[in-house]
Each structure stands twice: as structure tokens, then as C-alpha cells.
Image (cartoon, helix red, strand yellow):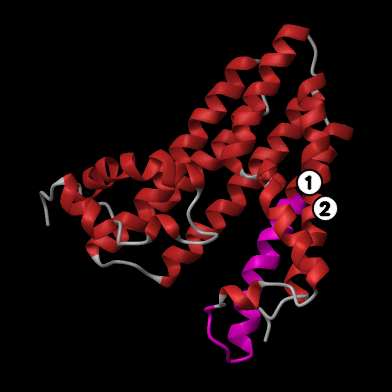
Amino acid sequence: MSKPSVAEVREGGQPPGIKERRNEEHWAGRLYMRDISPYVSTVFVRLRVPPNPITYLMMAFGVLAGVVLAFGGLWSAVLAAVLVQVYLLLDCSDGEVARYTGRTSVAGIYLDRIGHYLAEIALLIGLGVRAQGEFEAGGWVVAGMAAAIGAALIKVETDNVVVARAKAGLGEHVSEAAMQPRSAGLGLARRAASALRFHRVIQAVELSLLVVVAAVVDAVRGDLLATQVLTVACVAVAALQTVLHLVSVLASRRLH
């Protein structure tokens, strides 16, 4: 246990099917981060670091990315994107360490969810401050906060499906069939929205990369137009997705 190999930690920390988990595994995790994370997880296991402190560290990097993003200039956008990648790496590692050491817990799952809330909220607020161009209250700061509220509400809608089912004495698992809207029209709209994946604009990894693109455009133009356009897009996506996701839940059999 004290000196496991990377292969051993990978085998114990990444059970079969982990990359295929619906709504749980990020595309970046499947694409590259799950290949990197066992090396970091092995270091944590060898140092006997419990999984929950790793989750706290994940939270810290997510919030720090939002703070850094609030500063102007291309450097802050690039640094925030790097911090988000570390956040994603730690998000993979805490679960791997928990599974390998047999220390999975309800508290760990809870902290992991809170970490995702904090990261997205911090990034969107940081984006609003960045679009404002200064550390003063203003319309762009309010826009960033509005987008952050929307992002949080979307997660609340998702998490409360489990809460509602538990309170009603139902199991946590929801089948793929139960997730489909009962209306054919709504089902088509849900598939279209899923194919477009516009909701990812307000998720931490995607948003951090979009901010870098906007920062490059701003640097070329010498203004903040690209960042401000991105902020407006985040507000629109958050508002639309909040409504669409609520309708999708209520129109399906997830609460039955």
C-alpha cells in the first residue's frame, strides 16, 4: 500500500466503465486527464494523503482560477486556464485515491459537488469583473453574477432530482428511458440541445478556454469587446439552460 505502482493505482482507482459514465465524466477526462491523473494519484497514495484534502485542494484551485481571471490581460486568462486544468486533474485524483484506498464516503461525494459549484461560480463572477475592466461594481459584474446564479441553479435542478427521489423513497438510479421527455416534441428539442452542447459554455473547462480566445482577440483589438460578448453569451446560455433543464426534468419520468 505504501509504494504502489502507477499501474496498480490506475487499476484500483479507475474501475471499468469510469470513462463512460453519463453526466459524470468530462470529455477532457476521457480524452487525456484520466491518462495523466494516476501518476498524481500514486504520489498522493504514497504520501498517505486522504481523498478529502485532495478535494479541498481542488476547490482552492477552482476558486483561485476565478480570482485570477478577474485581472485584465492575456496572462491572467492563460493562468486561469492552467489552474482549471489542475482543478480537473485533482477532481480525477481525489476519486482515484478514494477508490484505491477504500476510503470512498458520502462526505467526499458531497465535497466534490460543492467544488464544482464553487469553481463555476467563481469563474463566471471573475469573467464579469474582467469584462468590467476594473474592480468596481458595474453592469458587467452584475452580468457575471447573473450567469453564476444560473450555472448554480442548473446544478441545483440536477442534484435535487436525487434529493426528491430519496425523500419519496425511490432509488437514486434513473434509467435512460426515464430521462427522456414524454412529449415527442420535447424529446426532439432535448436531443438537439444535447447535440449543440451550448450548455458547456458556462462549464469550467470550456469557459476557461473560451476566455483565452477572447483575451487574444481583446489584445489584438485593444479593448474588451470579445470578453464582453462572451459574458453576454454566458448570461444567455445560463438563463436558457436553467429553463430548459427544469422543463426537461419535469417532462420526463425522472421524478416517478
Quadrant (top left/top right/bottom left/bottom right) for the N terminus: bottom left
Image-based side of 169 in relation to 87, left or right: right
Q: Is residue 48 visible?
A: no
Q: Are marks 2 and 1 in contact (CB under 8 Å)?
A: yes
Image-based side of 127 in relation to 206, left or right: right
- Please provide percent x and percent y for residue 95: 36, 57
Element marked by disc 2: helix
Q: Which residue is mark 1?
A: 237
Q: Nearer the viewer, residue 225 or 69?
A: 225
Name the image quarter holding residue 249.
bottom right
Name the residue located 29 percent from the left edge and 63 percent from the top edge. 99
Q: Is residue 107 visible?
A: yes
Magenta segment boundaries in residue numbering: 149-173
| Mark 2 surroundings: few (<14), some (14-19) or many (≥20) residues within 10 A | few
Name the image quarter holding residue 192.
bottom right
Residue lying furthest bottom: 169
For badge 2, the amino acid type reads Leu
Q: Nearer the viewer, residue 31 or 147?
A: 31
- Please provide percent x and percent y for residue 125: 72, 39
| Numbered circle sitting on residue 77 | none
Q: Which residue is mark 2?
A: 240
Magenta stretch: dominant secondary structure: helix
Position above or below: 84 against 54 = above
